[in-house]
Amino acid sequence: MFNNQKSDNIFNLLFQGISEGVLVVNEDQIIAEVNKSVAEIFGYAENELRGLHLNTLIPTSVHVKHDDYFRAFIKRGESRKMGIGKDLFGIRKDGSKFPVEAGLNPFSIGNTKYVMAILTDITVRKKAEKEIKDLNNHLEIKVEQRTEELEKAIDQLKFSNKELQQEVNKRKRAEAEMKNALHKERELGDLKTKFLSLVSHEFKTPLSGILTSATLIGKYEKEEQQHKRDKHIKTIKNKVHYLTNILNDFLSIERLESGKVTYKFEEFSLQNLVNEVIYNANVTLKSGQQIIYPNQIEDCILKQDKNVMELVLSNLLSNAIKYSPEETQINFEIDQDSERLYFHVKDQGMGIPQKDQKHIFERYFRAENAINNQGTGIGLNIAKVHLENLGGKIYFDSRENEGTTFYIEIPKQHE
């Protein structure tokens, strides 16, 4: 309420057309004027609020703080929104509390200071905000749930992919094993075919020679024909020796292929080994051929598989004899140190063509210039595998039409 008509007209003019609640208090926080909207918001008649203290419309719990706030505001005299960042509440006539939003504007009439508050009931907005907040919270929970479900689905997919990959790998391994088995089966078939071909060819000729010599021996009944009988007896021995070597080679191949090969390590004399190998080789020498070897060997006791060493050395001497012409010599040299033996077998034969040398240790391979000679092409392969199994090695040097030297290294004592 104001003291003159002029003031009333000013306030009436200010309130016209304003839909928000407008409340004016003086510097003592006494309500000077309200519009109809304020009365409706707080549940009063317009004339009920004039002259009441502002605390009538404010919750009791904030009266003290509000008094301090109001005095500071009057002192500053600046327009501002009230309760920025805070929730403000009003008290209706029935005592119910509701959220409000307030814009404060200080002004003066004469010497009297006033504050005009523009009030808005934001109950609906707060409710909407709460609903939005609740929806957002619900949405966040849903998103978290969906994220968790998605992560679980991804983990399950990864696990499924891992299982699938494992299954794929298993199938690939199975396919590889099957292909390998088929490849080995084909190789075995090829080996069987080659074996039958070799047996047919390599056995037929010696057996024919044995049969012929045996038949001719029967015709030489006179004593003065002994030299002829001796000739055919030697032929028979050579052929039998050749067939024995072939059978030994095939037996070694079968054992190496099946993994059933076992080595018998025993102690024996180097001198005895060399004497046996040279004795067996001398039986197969061609006319005029001679094996040159040291008469005085530095003997030592070996611990190896004697049969295998004899097989390997006999194979090399046999090849040297077979691929060298008559009236030539074959050098068989032996060296040793404290741990290893070194054998050299050198011939004056046809040699190995350069283009064939890289294949010489392959099973069933025969050099181009040796096709017309008897042989299986497995002896060197067997020798190489056996030597490597016993900790040794074999290599060679060869020049076509000049001769070949094979080198063997092997430990004296097998560990």
Image: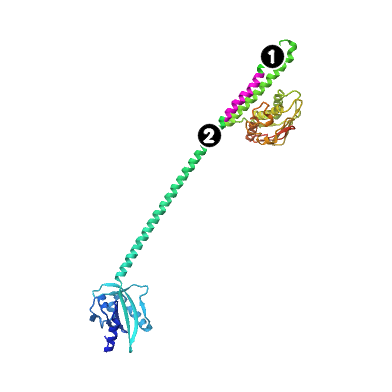
Question: For the magenta stretch, what is the residue range?
Answer: 190-209
The amino acid type of the residue labelled 2 equals Leu
Classify 148 as above or below 197: below
Q: Secondary structure at mark 1?
A: helix
Classify 349 as above or below 102: above
Q: Secondary structure at mark 2?
A: helix
Q: Are marks 1 and 2 in contact (CB under 8 Å)?
A: no
Quadrant for residue 402, please give it. top right
On the rendered structure, is 260 left or right of 97?
A: right
The amino acid type of the residue labelled 1 equals Leu
Label 1 and label 2: CA atoms lie apart by 50 Å
Label located before the other in sequence (1 or 2)? 2
The residue singled out by tag 1 in the image is 216
Way the structure is coloured: rainbow
Quadrant for residue 224, please give it. top right
Quadrant containing the N terminus is bottom left
- Front residue of this view, candidates 406 and 124: 124
The residue singled out by tag 2 in the image is 182
Quadrant containing the C terminus is top right
